[in-house]
Amino acid sequence: MSGGRAELGIGAAWLEQEHRYLGIPFPPLGERFDRLGEQLEIITGLWATPPGERFSYHGKHYQLEECASVPRPARRPPVIIGGAGPRRTPALAARFADEFNSGMSDGLAARFANFRRICEQSGRDPAGVRLSTTLPVCCGSTRGEAARRAAALGEAGARMLAMGVTGTPGDILGRLAELHAAGADTVYFHLYDVTDTDHVRLLGREVLPQVTNI
């Protein structure tokens, strides 16, 4: 459907309330990580199985017998694994991921340094893994406009933006430069009000063209 442009982001889950909303089991953290490891083995194993062959897997939580990967992806989708934990998340990312996402940007440099160390210990070249983070953003042509846009988001928006940046395009670019210096080569903007298309246009016009200069 995407012509091969799809990417797979996957993690161990963290928000129990969402699981209750949807009726999805939320086992303890250790089991969630165990399941995630098996899920990654299955997904990447299916993708690596040549056309016409079958894939079987026998784990503690999942068992597959002679599974055919049909339909096959147009290409092997890049795998993104993200989280702020110091041990199991970066270890799984070092083994399976094309991109390691640190979550929010606080403590970014330390998490990236820890991930590189785990890669080197496991024999993976960390230079071959994209490093990304997420930045809540509220931008305005002036700081007053940005503040008004942020105020319209209410309490939930304010909580999110406390972990990000509210300001002019120059303020956003300054924060991006800091994240780049901390090791990020990819930054995902978290835009709380996705219906505010003027906000998106402002970022596209005033911020994105300058990113290559950072």
Image (spheres, grey):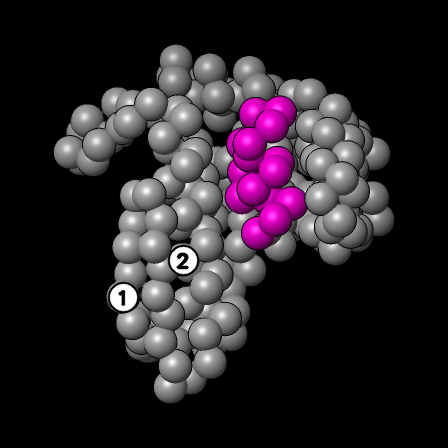
Residue type at mark 1?
Answer: Glu
Q: Is residue 46 left or right of residue 102?
A: left
Which stretch appears magenta? Answer: 81-96
The location of residue 175, given as percent across then percent down, is 73, 29
Residue type at mark 2?
Answer: Ile
Crowding at dot 2, Cα within 10 Å, few <14 / some 14-19 / many 20+, comes out as: many
- Write down the quadrant of residue 18 in the picture: top left
Q: Give the residue drawn at x 35%, y 65%.
A: 56
Q: Secondary structure at mark 2?
A: helix
- Alpha carbon separation for disc pair 2 and 1: 11 Å
Tag 2 near tag 1, CB within 8 Å: no
Of 176 and 98, which appears nearest the observer?
98
- Write down the quadrant of residue 151 in the picture: top left
Looking at the picture, does residue 164 appear above or below residue 7? above
The location of residue 153, given as percent across then percent down, is 40, 23
Query: Disc 1 marks which residue?
Result: 65
Q: Give the residue drawn at x 45%, y 74%.
A: 49
Whether residue 90 is in magenta: the answer is: yes
Query: Disc 2 marks which residue?
Result: 42
Q: Of the residues tagged 2 and 1, which is closer to the observer?
A: 1
Crowding at dot 1, Cα within 10 Å, few <14 / some 14-19 / many 20+, comes out as: few
Whether residue 197 is in magenta: the answer is: no
Of 194 and 183, which appears nearest the observer?
183
Can residue 192 be seen?
yes
Q: Give the residue drawn at x 53%, y 21%.
A: 161
The numbered mark at residue 212 is none
Q: Give the residue drawn at x 50%, y 71%.
A: 48
Can residue 3 be seen?
no
The location of residue 59, given as percent across then percent down, is 35, 49
The location of residue 100, given as percent across then percent down, is 62, 43
